[in-house]
Amino acid sequence: QVQLVESGGGLVQPGGSLRLSCAASGSIFRLNAMGWYRQAPGKERELVVLISRDGTTNYADSVKGRFIISRDNAKNTVYLQMNTLKPEDTAVYYCNAHIATSYFASGYYWGQGTQVTVSS
């Protein structure tokens, strides 16, 4: 079994910052690409940013220059530093990872989500 556990969400004022973390645990043979998605009320889940195992990143245009993704492969953890937050960043943020559980088996896993609310 594999688990992704997110932390770091909360309430912040516009212009503020938050840092999200997502730790993977369980039967991990190899942790491949990781990413963050978000879902605002009444909207579909959307990609925020992806990071490959070697550190290549792909940001949504809406967060470029404000959000920074990083990962620590030794800790099986991915981080999302969110700066200059806007009310439209309010959403539940989900961690996603492509994980190989053996040489022959792999799949995509989701965290439980963490709420980020940007409001004055």
Image (spheres, helix red, strand yellow):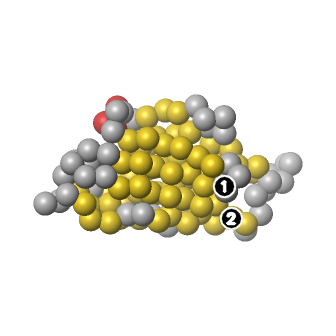
Amino acid at dot 2: Ser
Residue 76 in the image: state x and y as whole percent.
66, 55
Mark 2: few, some, or many residues within 10 Å (few <14, many ≥20)?
Answer: some
Task: Quarter of the image for the N terminus: give it.
Answer: bottom right
Residue 49 in the image: state x and y as whole percent.
46, 40
Residue 101 in the image: state x and y as whole percent.
78, 56
Mark 2 secondary-structure assignment = strand
Instruction: Name the residue at the right extreme.
Output: 103
Question: Of the residues under marks 1 and 2, which one precedes in the sequence?
Answer: 2
Classify residue 68 by image quadrant: top left
Classify residue 52 by image quadrant: top right
Amino acid at dot 1: Asn
Instruction: Residue 25: give its label.
Output: 2
Residue 113 in the image: state x and y as whole percent.
45, 64
Left or right of residue 3, residue 110 in this image? left
Instruction: Residue 120: give its label.
Output: none
Quickly name the residue at label 1. 76
Mark 1 secondary-structure assignment = loop
Mark 1: few, some, or many residues within 10 Å (few <14, many ≥20)?
Answer: some
Q: Is residue 76 visible?
A: yes
Task: Quarter of the image for the C terminus: give it.
Answer: bottom left
Left or right of residue 57, residue 104 in this image? right
Left or right of residue 59, residue 116 in this image? left
Q: What whole-number distance in Å separates the C-alpha atoms at marks 1 and 2?
A: 7 Å
- Residue displayed at 32% across by 45% down: 83
Q: Is residue 107 visible?
A: no
- Residue displayed at 76% across by 58% down: 28
When the figure is inspected, residue 15 is found, relative to residue 58, above or below; the finding is below
- Residue displayed at 53% across by 44% down: 70
